[in-house]
Amino acid sequence: MARNLDIGLGALTEDLFGLNIRGVRTVAATFIQPREVFDAARHPTWLDRYTPTIRLAFFMLSLTAVFRFLWASEEGAFAAAITEQFVDLADDLGDDFDPAAAMERYFGVYAAMIPFAWLATQSLLSLVLRVWGKGTGAVLRLRLHMTALIPSTLFGLLFLLTMPVLFKDVAALLSAWTFASSGLMVALDVTTSFRGGVGGETRTGRIVRASTFGLFVFLANVVVSVVASAVAYAAVILGSGHRNFV
């Protein structure tokens, strides 16, 4: 039988809050000292200091999807903009088609797909996007890839949290800020990868690689969003019983 060791309050604090504190530290470091996190990603245990970034990214994407679904149920510019798309279909689909119910179904499917589709797409992209230097294996490329995405993923989550307050009744402003936020997320991906992880012997070479990384991540996100939206739209139409309309 193993001997009981003296386990005090410090150990209990680690049990309760250790992972949370480590996760917050990891996210903060990707903004302040990203190179430290990228260096830790090259060690099997993340130096026992940082949380694996693939776990953090998936967690934040899941929260984003949940809030995206919840905000669809709120009254305001965001919900109205989506509902309006289904109002235009009401004449074609008949009086039994409920645009408000269609919106909720649409976002239910969309929100459920996004985290898994995003993770699968970014994982595949990490396999083919070789910007991290020679000798970087597939698993390490995935770690570095996800590390570079933490700041932009957090920004996306914060944008969703504040959207119902900032853009409650101003649909035009919502569209403009959504476009601007996409540009800011690309900038975060480029600067984080440049400051921490991309390979290259010259500054120009690293800028090119970081810019390539940001561009392909953006394109992959667009593909995920379009595909998820198309699937959710099809689910709404099929759910209404109008299979020939898809």
Image (cartoon, rainbow, N blue to C red):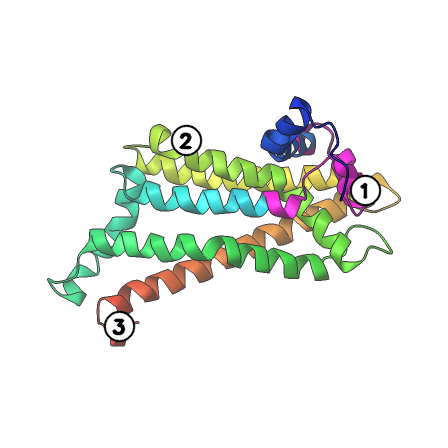
Circles 2 and 1: CB distance less than 8 Å?
no
Q: Residue at x 37, y 28 (%)?
A: 166
Quadrant in which the C terminus is drawn: bottom left
Res 162 label = 2
Q: How crowded is mark 2: few (under 14 residues within 10 Å), some or many (20 or more)?
A: few
- Secondary structure state at the residue bearing disc 3: helix
Q: Residue furthest bottom?
A: 244
Query: Where does the magenta region start and end?
Result: 30-56
* Mark 2 residue element: helix
Q: What residue type is labelled 2?
A: Thr
Q: Which element carries disc 1, helix, strand or loop? A: helix
The image quadrant that residue 28 belongs to is top right
What distance separates the C-alpha of mark 2 from that of mark 1?
37 Å
Q: Nearer the viewer, residue 2 or 214?
A: 2
Q: Compare marks 2 and 1 and give the one earlier in the sequence.
A: 2
108 displayed left or right of 30: left
Q: Mark 1 points at which residue?
A: 204
- Is residue 221 shown in magenta? no
> Is the residue marked by circle 1 packed among few (<14), some (14-19), or many (20+) residues within 10 Å?
few
* Residue indicated by mark 3: 245
Please identify, in this view, whether the residue under mark 2 or under mark 1 is nearer the observer: 2
Q: Distance between the residues labelled 1 and 3?
A: 51 Å
The residue shown at (39%, 40%) is 175
Q: Tell which residue pokes out farthest to the right in this image.
A: 201
Indicate the position of residue 35 as horizontal and vertical percent values: 78, 35
Horizontal and vertical percent position of residue 144? 73, 47
